[in-house]
Image: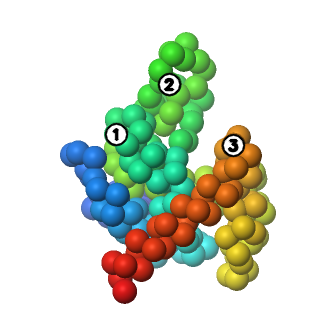
Amino acid sequence: MIKEALVSFCLTFAPVEHTSVPSEHQLIFDIAKCVKQYNEYSNTLDFPVVLAAAQAMHESNWGLSRFAREGNNYYGIKTWDLTRPHIKVQGQEDANFGMRAYPNLCFSVADYMELLLTSKTYTYFREVLSRGEYTWEELLEGLDDYATDVEYRAKVIKMIYKIQEIMDLAYG
């Protein structure tokens, strides 16, 4: 089961920890490391590294958001279980939810991947991903419920191309 793989993964691999806000490039490569390790370890669908990096960069404003800095939440993932580690949204301290807080970047990445690889909400995403051949537009159609922004898909696709460019420059 993926949940067991998540716990084992996070306990097995050396976590990626940042004592300060990492550079944009370092954050991309750290996310890529977490995704690649999780893909190898979990034996599930081959999750696209560039998508995980692009969504993290978009959701966390390149790692600068308060939730990323204070709680390693790079994907804007909420929790309604307030007994779990979380951070309250400023001005909404009485809300019945919080933004999840993670001990390190890889926990955040693994939880995000588990969400997309197990939730009924993202069934179409998994169907497209399992085919192995898809366009970004088609794959991201399966994430239409991830955010309320009607331009979300276009923004993430734009970020994907930016991340691909950075990775191409680094890896040749």
User: Which is nearer the N-term, disc 1 or disc 2?
Assistant: 1
Q: Identity of the amino acid at label 2?
A: Val
Q: Answer whether residue 66 is visible to the viewer in this image.
A: yes
Percent across and percent down for residue 82 are: 52, 25
Q: Are marks 2 and 3 in contact (CB under 8 Å)?
A: no
Would you place residue 168 above or below residue 15 in this image? below
Crowding at mark 2 (Cα within 10 Å: few <14, some 14-19, many 20+): some
- At 74% from the left edge and 52% from the top edge, which residue is drawn? 144
Mark identifier at residue 149: 3
Numbered disc 2: secondary structure: loop
Q: Nearer the viewer, residue 162 or 125?
A: 162
Name the quarter where the N terminus is drawn: bottom right
Q: Residue furthest left?
A: 19
Q: Are marks 3 and 1 in contact (CB under 8 Å)?
A: no
- At 47% from the left edge and 21% from the top edge, which residue is drawn? 90
Q: Kindly identify which residue carries mark 1.
A: 69
Name the quarter where the C terminus is drawn: bottom left
The Cα–Cα distance between marks 2 and 3, rounded to whole angstroms, is 18 Å
Q: Kindly identify which residue carries mark 2.
A: 89
User: Which is nearer the N-term, disc 2 or disc 3?
Assistant: 2
The Cα–Cα distance between marks 3 and 1, rounded to whole angstroms, is 23 Å
User: Which is nearer the N-term, disc 3 or disc 1?
Assistant: 1
**155 relative to 60 in the view: left or right:** right
